[in-house]
Image (spheres, helix red, strand yellow):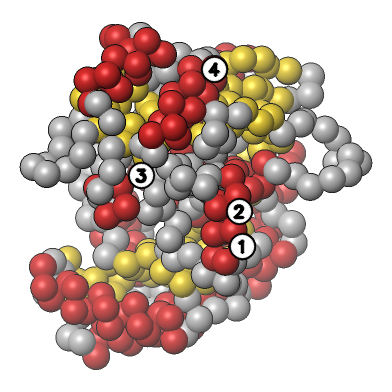
Amino acid sequence: MNRDAFARELGVLVGDGNVQGVPVTAGEPPAWQVAPGSAAEVAEVVRRCNRDGVAVLPVGSGARPTRWKAVAERPRVHVAMRRMDHVVHLDETSLLVHVQAGLTGAGLEKVLVPRGLSLGDYPATMLGSTIGGMIAVRTPGKSSARHGFLEDAVLGVSAVLADGRSIHTRVAPRRATGPDLARALCGSEGTIGVITSVVLRIHLKAEARLLAAYVLPSFDAALAAAYLALREECQPAGLRVYDSAEARAHLGDELALAGPALDDDAALLLVATAGPTDLAVCDRDLVTSAVEAEGGAATDPRLADAWWKLRGGDPRQVPPPSLQVTATPSKLRAVYRAVRDAARDAGATARAHVSRFDAGGAVVFVTLVADGKPLDGARLDAVRATCEQAAGDAGGWLLGARPAQMDPYLAALRAELDPNGILNPGALS
């Protein structure tokens, strides 16, 4: 492959101003970043790459580096979707929106909110990602106790396959028959096709949002109360459980104003409910009832206000968690205890909070500390490895871990659709 000739061809396809070289280390093959302006241009770029076996790596809101060996050994083209950032169609009656893959969640909200609409009660941290990136990469961070996982809102996907063909999964009522090919593209990380646009279900903007805080006698009781409320079909916009040490680390100033100190064994449950006012009140009352059934009581709502600000990006300095473990509802308490005990046996302390609740489970966020300071360096690595083993033995999964049982079927699908292996090689393997 002639490097200069290939770069000129890319310029013809997407415009010279939309092609730039990507720095590579000595001895590596060349790499470029292109910014197509339409699905047709994406198809032409992918078709051209397929001809010469050039790797194609979709890029969302940032140039996420890809260092897989499978990529480093071959020329590659990073396909940046930043120019494809438009709302194609908004159906305010059916509550559907058709958007290009390069539009960010925050950009979509800017279009929806003035119309009394919203993508939903998802974590603010995900809104900086592109819609295509949110759909292509499945993580618990893109979930909501109220609205479920974002991919559940996907009603149609358009994508470009490795040979340059475009596919469009049809938006049809659930009564329609046949396989839903959009499911295969969700979470495929660009290995099956390059997503170019998505049709999403959207929601009416919440009429009311209510915040409440509760103290419970133990972490186990707080988790039990959370799932008791969810089983009663409460649909909170946000839900979090802190153990006492984590509550002090995150909400120390507010706890000082809230009254009596939080006992070491106690836990804090914080909830936001949203929607029509009557439903928001009903959901809050369901949580209150569940808390009381587990021996807890309401406390100063300023704690919930502070938590909600943190959730939305409060600038206070809170160290990132050392370990993130997901577990089913029946395993959460065992996972928390196992990690706490493993950290103690290793001469450290584990403090934790649980969030991203849904019917299938939640995520335990653990910070490992010693002498009041988060661990780092080699000691963090050693203690974290011990805690990871304990979490796995108790039935937890490291956040982002992927079950391998379906790998043979995924490999067969990729081989059929992408025989030259150009689409994000190294991902999901």
Q: Earlier in the sequence, mark 2 or mark 4?
A: 4
Looking at the image, is mark 1 or mark 3 nearer the viewer? Answer: 1
What residue appears at the point 69 percent right and 54 percent down from the top-left corner?
234
Which residue corresponds to mark 1?
Answer: 409
**C-alpha span from label 1 to label 4:** 29 Å
Q: Dots 2 and 3: beta carbons under 8 Å?
A: no
Q: Where is residue 176 in the image (x, y as percent from the top left)?
A: 89, 39
Q: In this view, does 347 lie to the left or right of 421?
A: left
Under tag 1, what secondary structure?
helix
Q: Which amino acid does label 4 sit on?
A: Ala
Q: Which mark is residue 310?
A: 3
What residue appears at the point 66 percent right and 47 percent down from the top-left corner?
183
Under tag 3, what secondary structure?
helix
Q: Earlier in the sequence, mark 1 or mark 4?
A: 4
In front here: 355 or 421? 421
Which residue corresponds to mark 2?
Answer: 413
Under tag 2, what secondary structure?
helix
Q: Which amino acid does label 3 sit on?
A: Leu
How many neighbours does mark 2 have within 10 angstroms: few (below 14), some (14-19), or many (20 or more)? some
How many neighbours does mark 3 have within 10 angstroms: few (below 14), some (14-19), or many (20 or more)? some
Looking at the image, is mark 2 or mark 3 nearer the viewer? Answer: 2
Q: Dots 1 and 2: beta carbons under 8 Å?
A: yes
**C-alpha span from label 2 to label 3:** 42 Å
| Quadrant housing residue 96 | top right
**C-alpha span from label 1 to label 3:** 41 Å
